[in-house]
Image (tube, rainbow, N blue to C red):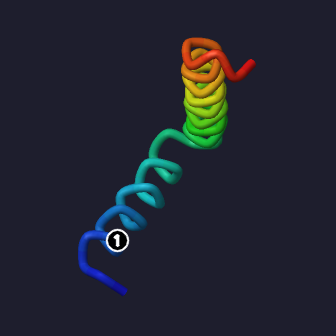
Amino acid sequence: MPLHLVGDVVLAVVAVRVLGRDVLTLARRAAAAGVRLGVSELRRDEQKDGRA
């Protein structure tokens, strides 16, 4: 496992231990928002290209 991945995992575990389950909820919401943003960007690009 690469060292930067180990650091990310350790940071995530510490954040969950310190801040509790709220961190997981916030992470899920941020991920969902990122997915929605990505999908809307794809749709906008398709409409701009005249594919939709």
Task: Give 42 or 25, whichever is nearer the viewer.
Answer: 42
Image point 37% across, 87% down: which residue?
1
Q: Residue at x 58, y 42 (%)?
A: 20
> Looking at the picture, does residue 13 appear above or below residue 40?
below
Provide the residue designation for mark 1. Answer: 5
Give the quarter of the figure containing the C terminus: top right
* Total numbered labels: 1
Q: Residue at x 57, y 30 (%)?
A: 38
Q: Residue furthest right?
A: 52
The location of residue 16, given as percent across then percent down, is 52, 50
Q: Residues within 10 Å of mark 1 (few under 14, many from 20)?
A: few
Secondary element at image label 1? helix
Q: From the viewer's side, name the closer residue of 17 and 11.
A: 11
For this orientation, the residue located farthest to the bottom is: 1
| In the image, farthest residue toward the left | 3
Find residue 5 and report its image quarter: bottom left
Residue 37, above or below 19: above
Residue 39 % position (x, y): 65, 28
The image quadrant of residue 11 is: bottom left
Q: Residue at x 49, y 39 (%)?
A: 19
Determine whether 39 is above or below 8 in the image: above
Residue 17, image x, y percentages:
50, 53
Horizontal side of 15 relative to 40 (left or right) equals left
Residue type at mark 1 is Leu
